[in-house]
Image (cartoon, helix red, strand yellow):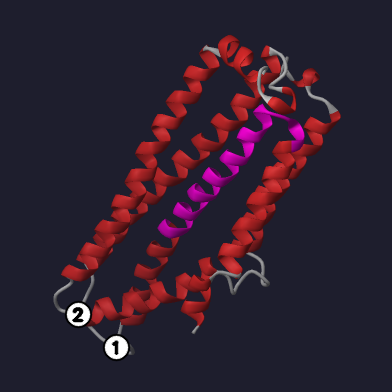
Amino acid sequence: MHALPHLSVIDWISLAIFFASWAGYAWYSEHSQRGANGLIRTAQRYRLEWAYRMLERDLRVADSTLIGNLVTSVSFYANTTIYIIAGLVAALGASDKLLSFTSELPFGGAGNRELLEIKLMLLLASFVFAYFKFTWSLRQFNLLSILVGAAPLGKTGEPGIDTYARRVAGANNLAGDDFNRGIRAYYFGLAASGWLLNPAILGAFAVVVLVVLFRRDYRSPALQLLRD
């Protein structure tokens, strides 16, 4: 808290843009009616179709392999995030050296030591948030594998099949949504690194990340392919 008085007006404005962009886009893509046609919620409908097809198959080796691929991807990001967090903690311990390094960069550098520490804490908080999301996603994918292992055999319309298909798809959606939140934290963590150079760059990077996420979720060829 002792570092907060060192923040200027442009710092506070950039922080407001940063958090508004992050929280606002998360709400828009996951909960708003206008964001229902994006990549995230379009993929959820395909997960339900996957659940129905899985329940029709007697041998589910392909489904187990697909879930294994998803778990591997999440595990990779979770492990990578640990290294990033360790590096940021080490940077906090060597803030004096980092301060002298950033002072030689353009756009004004990181300021004094107290200001540098709060900037690093924003970066650290972003990646800690990502780590929690990735590990929770991993646990939910493990739950999904249990549901697949316990799944009955049947087709659409048979007693209990629709309910179980929605249960499997729901677990898949929960795991996938938390994975997406972790990826989003990576994007905004990269935006937070701009604060080390200049507070205005933090706000500009947050807006750039917002535009990139919107284009990929609502204007990308991948979304068009799923809709077609």
Please give the range of residues in magenta: 175-200
Residue 142 x %, y %: 29, 53
Residue annotated with mark 2 = 57
Give the residue drawn at x 66%, y 54%. 210
Q: Total of numbered circles in the picture? A: 2
Dot 1 surroundings within 10 Å: few (below 14), some, or many (20 or more)? few
Depicted 87 relative to depicted 194: above or below = above
Callout 2: SS: loop
Depth order, front residue of 36/228: 228
Query: Is 89 on the left or on the right of 76, as rendered?
Result: right
Residue annotated with mark 1 = 158
Give the residue drawn at x 56%, y 37%. 126
For badge 1, the amino acid type reads Glu
Residue 18 x %, y %: 70, 42
Query: Is 194 on the left or on the right of 143, as rendered?
Result: right
Residue 86 part of the magenta segment: no
Query: Is 145 on the left or on the right of 200, as rendered?
Result: left
Residue 34 x %, y %: 68, 72
Residue extending farthest to the left is 59
Please state which of the two labelled residues, at mark 1 or mark 2, is closer to the viewer. Answer: 2
Query: Is 39 on the left or on the right of 201, as rendered?
Result: left
Instruction: Pick whichever of labels 1 and 2 is earlier in the sequence.
Output: 2
Depth order, front residue of 105/172: 105
Callout 1: SS: loop
